[in-house]
Amino acid sequence: MSANIGEKEQSEAGNGLRVVDKLVLHGGCIDFRTLCERVVTEQTRYLVLDLDRTVYFAQNVGELLGWELCGWIGYGPEKYEILSARERKGRFLWGWTKYPFATANYLSLGVRWWAFPGLYYLLMGKVGYRLHRMRRWVYRRLGHEAIESVQRIPRTALMHHLTRVPYETAHMLAERVLERIEADQVITADDVRWLKERYPNLKVVISSASPRPAVAAVAERLGIDDYLFSQVEEQGGYPSSPSLLKRAFLLFQMPRRISPPHPSEHNAGRNKIRNLRRRYPDFDRVETVGITDTGYGEDHTWAEYFTRVADINSADPFPPLVKAGSPVEEIHSACVLTRSERDGLAVGQPIAPERSRIPETRVYTRNELEQLFGERVSALSRMIEQAMRLEGELSQAARQIHERLGEVSREMEQAVQRFNAAEQEARRQALASVRRLMRRHDALEAQYRRLVQPVSQVFYEVGRQREEARRQVARHAAS
């Protein structure tokens, strides 16, 4: 549940835009250490890494963990161990020949668990983000942080299904996933050791929206100093279900226990920044570097808080237009080699040409970017001023909705406590009370999105034009 439902628009509206001081498009494909030599300095105190599609190229560890869990439950531990011992790639675990009935059970479970969240994410997220007209509709319906709202659905489903096994089992399954995708690893334990030896004052942190078993397994494998993740209450070695479950998740599995709203938090979007500041009070006062893949633009907000940011292997790199008050000095963009690509180069195998579209490194200074985008920056800054005026007119109504959401949250805390304490025969009635509050919460958030729709549409257009500016730079550099 949002702590401050209007924070996104207020944060954006408080500043106009400027071009970044320096934009570096790294030519060809480089290894992770080379990138770090170019973005990390002796003064850097925090290096923050995203997880999915960053540490592992084109791989979502949380998603793969969900399918691994499906195999563990669908086949049973004994059959899973036999089947998973085979060499395999991808997310599916096939056993038609040896275990036809268990395979049918596994597929049935996969459909029940992932049909709704998978199709929702495909249509509203992947397709919705790439098609301009549909993307505009998605943003009108879900607000300015539409992609985070879409990604929350499959993430909530995963966190709900992980309640079926103890944490140690989920951690073991995450380890199996990491062993299978090792060839796609971009950042290794040797790289992290090298970083700590070269920069002894540096703290390396992973901040991910994935749940704890996935993030902890990666952090332990790499020797990371600290990690942040989407969390829920844990009791007796088991995680609890997130409090804001959709109806589709409840049709097939009664929650064992529901996490109260207070300890439940998705470490995504601006929550990543809030949690970093909470964990490290000096975060805004020291030199920081953030490295992420920025898939679908969900981590573009990093350029508002870090000293330097780098997008790697990204289809949606950081735009060169940033908030006027942002501390960011440099934006870097690079194709970074995987473990298998590095091994291939060692024996003379070439890198696939589509991996890097920039043949040579190109550095854009502030003066060059101002010549390219000076007029666009002025126009977008005026649009932000317009949104700021609109927001001021809507602030009182928005505050009233936020207060009502706070009331629902307090009622939800009490309803969740009653459900967790209920005996078996009373649990369905207690769950019905929780679900009524879920619907009230969803209705209030929908009311808020309708209220601020004019503001959200302005920021949607600002974001779209910032992304177009980045594509324009890429075309300029490639030519």
Image (tube, grey):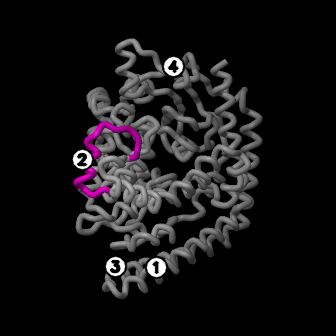
Residue closest to the eye, 62 or 396: 62
Q: Is residue 348 magenta?
A: no
Residue type at mark 4 is Gly
Q: Where does the magenta region start and end?
A: 75-92
Foreground label between 2 and 1: 2
Given the current orientation, which residue lies at the most extreme top position? 348
Mark 4 sits on what residue? 28
Q: Picture coordinates of residue 206 (x, y %)?
A: 37, 44
**Relative to 179, residue 165 above or below:** below
Q: Give the amino acid type for the residue marked by disc 3 in the picture.
A: Asn
Whether label 4 touches label 2, CB < 8 Å: no
Which tag, 2 or 3, sits closer to the chain's start? 2
**Residue found 67% across the figure and 72% down from its top:** 396
Provide the residue designation for mark 2: 82
Which numbered dot is residue 2?
A: none
Label located before the other in sequence (1 or 3): 3
Q: CA distance from mark 1 to mark 4?
A: 53 Å
Q: Is residue 290 visible?
A: no
The amino acid on which the numbered mark 1 sits, given as a three-letter code, is Val
Task: Residue under label 3, please give it.
Answer: 420
